[in-house]
Structure formats: structure tokens, C-alpha cells
Amino acid sequence: MKYIATLDIWSPQIQEAIVSGQIKLQRGQWLRCGSTGKRCRFVGITGGGTVHVIHWQGSSSETNRVFMSHIEFLRLTELHKAFRKESREGKTTATWQEYQAISH
């Protein structure tokens, strides 16, 4: 999947197209709030249908750091969900720390 041109996330039509899946975005896709100003980076759609982005943090490096920390948080959340499911089903006896280590 390729990245697309920067979109205006404040556009109701764009928001609806993203949430409905008509427009498919990759994590990291550049978006913009309005037609001018700094760009933000797409993280995903929350369970409630909210578009999750990381806004400009004062510098490119800080914006990227915050973006990457959100991505890592999502990765760990999904991994922990899988761990809980496997634990309930008796598919693993590993501790959370062990499960993390073997899942990298």
C-alpha cells in the first residue's frame, strides 16, 4: 500500500471516508488540520471511530518520537490482549514478561 497526498483531516468528507474505510490510510500517513500549517501523522482509528493522529510537537524529531511511542503502546496493547486470551484458553503458561520476550 502506498502513502497518498496529505489530506485535510478537518474536512468532514475526508473524516467520514477514513472512518468508513473508503479512504485507507497507513500508520504514519501525513495529514493536515486545515489547509495550512504543520502536518500530523495518522496512528489509527479508535474503537469508537475517532481518528487518532499525532500533531506537531515543536520539531520533527520530537514529533517522530511521540508518534513512535504511540505505535509501541498500540503494539504492546495488542500483544497483551493476545497474551490474556492465550492464558485464558490454556495455550500459554508463560508470565507476561516471558511472553513479551518470546514474541519479539
Image (spheres, grey):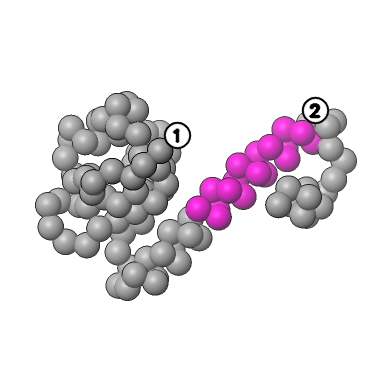
Splitting the image into 4 quarters, where does residue 88 fall?
top right
In percent of the image, x 33 and y 45: which residue is there? 3
Quadrant location, the N terminus: top left
- Dominant secondary structure, magenta: helix
As shown in the figure, which amino acid type bears the numbered disc 1? Answer: Gly
Q: Which residues are magenta?
A: 71-87
- Residue 77 or residue 39, whichever sits in front: 39
From the image, tell me which residue sits under label 1. Answer: 47
Assess disc 1: are there few (<14), some (14-19) or many (≥20) residues with their C-alpha within 10 Å of its C-alpha: few
As drawn, 97 above or below 60: above
Residue 2 placement, left or right of 80: left
Question: Could you say where residue 79 lies in the image, as x and y percent from the top left?
Answer: 65, 44
Q: In percent of the image, x 79 and y 36: which residue is there?
A: 87
Residue 69 in the magenta stretch? The answer is no
x, y (%) of residue 35? 12, 52
Residue at left offset 37%, top offset 66% = 63
Q: Amino acid at mark 2?
A: Glu
What kind of element bears circle 2? Answer: loop
Residue wearing tag 2: 89
Query: How far, Cα to Cα, is label 1 from label 2?
Result: 24 Å
Q: Is residue 53 visible?
A: no
Element type at mark 1: loop
Q: Residue 60, percent across and down?
A: 34, 70
From this viewpoint, which residue is outermost toward the left? 35
